[in-house]
């Protein structure tokens, strides 16, 4: 039986990670044709860093990722405070539903509805003028907030209420208490929420495609448009780097969430 | 500065707390004097914690008011009250060192860094925490955490210190030590303590006075001895200490003694000021340690007014004392607790032995059934 379990484990790993390892392998392929092995080379990595278009898209994705992760974390934190600390306020169930709706909403629908909103808002109040970095960031904040809330709410709920009461008892007002006690105690969850939001934003293709404008092509959009023509080896190299960054982010998020449970 | 009367340092006036339909605290009035250790004792749901939370400012009373040292505290937030609370869970800030935890309250009051440091050092010295100043709470033992929680409160020199189940999380040995330390600090600093607990032993050993709470009301207030020796109701008698309870009927009067029948064949004399008529149904109670047990054939024999014959049903040796259950006949079973002084003839009493039970006429109480 243990032999069977071991086999199952490795079969499971293979199912999940074989494609990724194939991709990583091909990123070191010297051949120009994606499917033929032509010897080991780091040529495509060099090529990648000379490609203005890719570097530019990566920079845009990074900016959007940082901005929307930060925005989503602030909104998610406010949402978590409302859900956990305000007790049973009127419309709490509706609020909870609305906050978590983006989790289950198909991305296409989120994308279309945001696009329509931006267009009509521009017609009505002239803001946001055109589509670009700003609209993508707003769209990403919208759906990332739900994920941040999912991370923060349980941490907030499991935080001992008496910590805040002790702070009040010792002479701190509610605002001081929030910044000196509540925030530091849930800090690890805030960090992992931010990292999750960043990865989601960095990774998003569908919603960005709907809300992007000229000059705001994100990395996933660029990759997608490139492979529509042909799978070029430099994309394999780029994907490998993204996998590495995402893996590091995941490890960091896990590290912080482990620290919070100590 | 002190406006309030010393014996009315804390005045709780007709306080009521309702949560929706539920009345958690029902019209409690109470005076607590300065420097007193007052203990609120009650089971879970008795309203003792709700009362404490109102005194600390975490909850507002639905009706009534609380006056501490001449100031009406109703409606004021906890950070503006001259009281501090030691939480049952200690509620130490996990991200701060011992030093920072203790200094937190002083810094919030706008006291300078230098003075905070000096006062924190003094208190840490006093509660023997100096070697742990830079540790985090997670690196401390239970007893040390408790001392941090205490230090964090008393460094602010509060008028009243509230302690929520202060010894609950400590093991038995540490409890006795900590309790003595707490009371020493209380006396040295002249603090007023309000202790909330469900543990009657904790209440009895710490308190100057105890208020016993049940269903949101204070049922009896008094020094521990008074509650134990002269409970004003069956509830109190049963709540504090262990108790023998019997159903009985008043049979008549013999001088100062009331004659109570416990069954057809068993009657006892009770010396109490209980108002009664013949034929009244009553509950009769006494404490197992007030009764004495003698071997039927022992040289030493009881001299009390009531001496009853019985058979030992159960013996359990507890170390400092031995507990017996003795059947007096007619299914009347009485429990007796004897101190194990020395090797007496009682040591040989075992299950099934014929014995005599000495049952004093005083120290027995009657309550209406």
Image (cartoon, coloured by chain):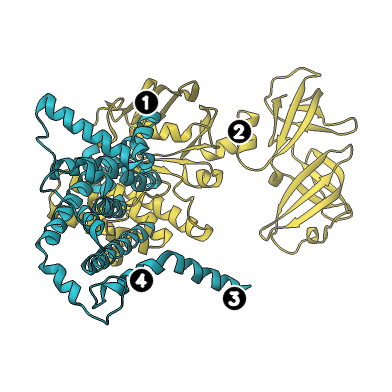
Chain colours: A cyan, B yellow
Q: Do marks 3 and 2 both belong to one polypeptide chain?
A: no
Q: Earlier in the sequence, mark 4 or mark 1?
A: 4
Is residue B40 or residue B102 the one in the foreground? B102
Residue B83 in view of the camera? no
With B59 as the anchor, is A144 left or right in this view? left
x, y percent for residue B310: 87, 45
Badge 3 element: helix
The residue where tag 2 is placed is: B236
Is residue B124 or residue B61 the one in the foreground? B61
With B92 as the anchor, is A224 left or right in this view? left
The residue where tag 3 is placed is: A3
Badge 4 element: helix
On screen, residue A132 above or below A122: below
Chain under callout 1: A
Q: How many marks?
A: 4
Q: CA distance from mark 4 to mark 1?
A: 48 Å
Residue B265 in view of the camera? yes
Q: Quadrant of the C terminus of chain B?
A: top right
Badge 1 element: loop
The residue where tag 1 is placed is: A91
Choose mark 4 or mark 2, whichever is in front. 4
Choose mark 3 or mark 2, whichever is in front. 3
Is residue B96 or residue B76 the one in the foreground? B96
Q: Do marks 4 and 1 both belong to one polypeptide chain?
A: yes
Q: Do marks 3 and 4 both belong to one polypeptide chain?
A: yes
With B237 as the anchor, is B250 left or right in this view? right
The residue where tag 4 is placed is: A21
**Mark 2 and mark 1 in contact (Cβ < 8 Å)?**
no
Badge 2 element: helix
Q: Quadrant of the N terminus of chain B?
A: top left
């Amino acid at each position: 039986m243990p032999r069977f379990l071991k086999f199952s484990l490795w079969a499971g790993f293979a199912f999940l990670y074989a494609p990724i390892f194939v991709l990583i392998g091909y990123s070191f392929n010297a051949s120009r044709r994606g499917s033929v092995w032509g010897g080991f080379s780091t040529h495509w990595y060099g090529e990648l860093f000379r490609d203005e278009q890719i570097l530019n898209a990566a920079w845009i994705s990074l900016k959007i990722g940082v901005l929307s992760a930060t925005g989503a974390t602030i909104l998610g934190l406010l949402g978590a405070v409302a859900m956990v600390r305000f007790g049973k306020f009127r419309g709490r169930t509706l609020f909870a539903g609305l906050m978590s709706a983006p989790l289950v909403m198909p991305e296409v629908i989120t994308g279309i509805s945001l696009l329509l909103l931006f267009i009509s808002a521009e017609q009505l109040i002239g803001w946001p003028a055109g589509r670009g970095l700003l609209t993508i960031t707003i769209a990403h904040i919208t759906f990332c907030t739900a994920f941040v809330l999912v991370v923060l709410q349980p941490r907030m709920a499991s935080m001992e209420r008496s910590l805040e009461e002790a702070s009040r008892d010792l002479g701190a007002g509610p605002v001081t208490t929030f910044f000196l006690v509540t925030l530091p105690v849930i800090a690890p969850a805030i960090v992992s929420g931010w990292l999750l939001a960043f990865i989601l934003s960095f990774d998003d293709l569908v919603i960005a495609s709907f809300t992007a404008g000229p000059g705001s092509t994100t990395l996933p959009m660029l990759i997608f448009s490139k492979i529509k023509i042909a799978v070029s080896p430099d994309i394999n190299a780029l994907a490998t780097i993204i996998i590495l960054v995402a893996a590091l982010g995941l490890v960091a998020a896990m590290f912080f969430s482990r620290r919070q449970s100590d | 500065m002190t406006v309030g009367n010393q014996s009315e340092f804390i005045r709780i006036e007709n306080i009521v707390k309702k949560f929706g339909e539920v009345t958690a605290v029902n019209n409690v009035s109470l005076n607590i004097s300065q420097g007193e250790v007052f203990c609120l004792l009650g089971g879970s749901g008795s309203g003792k914690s709700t009362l404490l939370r109102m005194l600390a400012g975490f909850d507002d009373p639905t009706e009534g008011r609380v006056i501490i040292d001449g100031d009406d505290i109703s409606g004021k937030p906890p950070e503006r009250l001259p009281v501090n609370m030691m939480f049952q869970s200690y509620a130490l800030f996990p991200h701060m060192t011992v030093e920072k935890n203790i200094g937190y309250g002083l810094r919030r009051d706008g006291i300078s860094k230098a003075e905070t440091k000096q006062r924190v050092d003094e208190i840490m010295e006093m509660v023997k925490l100096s070697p742990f100043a830079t540790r985090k709470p997670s690196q401390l033992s239970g007893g040390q955490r408790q001392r941090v929680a205490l230090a964090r409160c008393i460094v602010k020199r509060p008028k009243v210190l509230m302690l929520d189940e202060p010894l609950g999380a400590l093991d038995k040995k540490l409890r006795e030590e900590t309790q003595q330390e707490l009371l020493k600090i209380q006396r040295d600093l002249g603090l007023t303590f309000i202790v909330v607990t469900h543990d009657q032993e904790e209440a009895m050993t710490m308190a100057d006075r105890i208020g016993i709470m049940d269903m949101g009301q204070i049922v009896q207030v008094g020094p521990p001895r008074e509650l134990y020796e002269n409970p004003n109701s069956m509830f109190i008698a049963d709540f504090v200490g262990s108790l023998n309870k019997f159903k009985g009927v008043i049979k008549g009067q013999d001088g100062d003694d009331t004659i109570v029948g416990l069954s057809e064949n068993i009657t006892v004399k009770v010396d109490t000021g209980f108002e009664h008529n013949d034929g009244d149904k009553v509950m009769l109670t006494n404490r197992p340690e007030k009764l004495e047990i003698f071997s039927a054939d022992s040289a030493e024999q009881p001299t009390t007014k009531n001496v009853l014959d019985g058979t030992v049903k159960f013996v359990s040796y507890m170390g400092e004392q031995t507990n017996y259950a003795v059947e007096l006949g007619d299914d009347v079973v009485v429990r007796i607790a004897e101190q194990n002084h020395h090797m007496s003839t009682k040591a040989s009493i075992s299950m099934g032995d014929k014995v005599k039970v000495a049952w004093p006429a005083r120290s027995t109480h009657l309550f209406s059934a």
